[in-house]
Amino acid sequence: MTRFGLNKELEIEINKFFNAISDYMSEFEKVVIYYDNGQGTLGTMLDTLLITKSNIEHRVKFNHKEKRLFQVSDMLTCIDKIVYKYQNHIPLTKAEQYFFSVKELLRIVKQLESKRLNIKSHS
């Protein structure tokens, strides 16, 4: 799959996710998304998909040390990316291989399965 194809697939999945939780998110006066645009393409996707949502604020500049939830989210996103690559036979980068052994990753994924929200997308 090409980079464009992966980007399009990611955009579709993010859009499905936000549509699936739209009613829940509308219950809040304000929803803040912390993403530092570490990957420009993802930052652009988030901005594009969320621009019509009046109660969502995308924060790019913030103190990472003070935003522990961002750090946890960043780690979970990294794990999901590694799992996706593994399931789709996409080679891992050296940096991705550095943090977890396969055994550690499988243990983490198993532990996380019971913690995930079970959100059904409207596809």
Image (cartoon, rainbow, N blue to C red):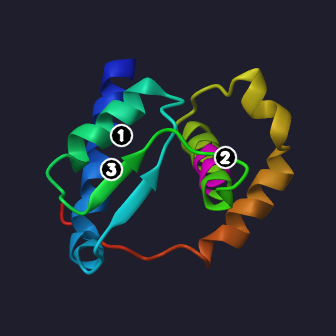
Q: Position of residue 34 (x, y in %)?
A: 49, 50
- Quarter of the image holding residue 32? bottom left
Q: Position of residue 43 (x, y in %)?
A: 39, 34
User: Residue at position x 47%, y 39% from top?
Assistant: 60
Lower position in the chain sequence, tag 2 or tag 3: 3
Asked if one can make out residue 2 in the rendered structure from this viewpoint, the answer is: no
Q: Name the residue beneath numbered marker 1.
A: 10
Which one is closest to the eye, mark 1 or mark 2? 2
Q: CA distance from mark 1 to mark 2?
A: 25 Å
User: What span is in magenta?
Assistant: 73-78
Disc 3 vs disc 1: Cβ atoms closer than 8 Å?
yes
Callout 1 amino acid: Leu
**Residue 76 is inside the magenta segment:** yes
Which element type, helix, strand or loop, lies under badge 1? Answer: helix
Q: In this picture, is 28 found above or below 108?
A: below
Q: CA distance from mark 2 to mark 3?
A: 23 Å
Q: Name the residue beneath numbered marker 2.
A: 64
Q: Locate residue 35 relative to residue 96 in the image: left or right.
A: left
Q: Name the residue beneath numbered marker 3.
A: 14
In which quadrant will I find the N terminus?
Answer: top left
**Residue 60 is inside the magenta segment:** no
Crowd tier of the residue under label 3, counting other residues whose Cα lies within 10 Å: few below 14, some 14–19, many 20 or above:
some
Crowd tier of the residue under label 1, counting other residues whose Cα lies within 10 Å: few below 14, some 14–19, many 20 or above:
some
Q: Position of residue 29 (x, y in %)?
A: 28, 74
Asked if one can make out residue 16 in the rendered structure from this viewpoint, the answer is: yes
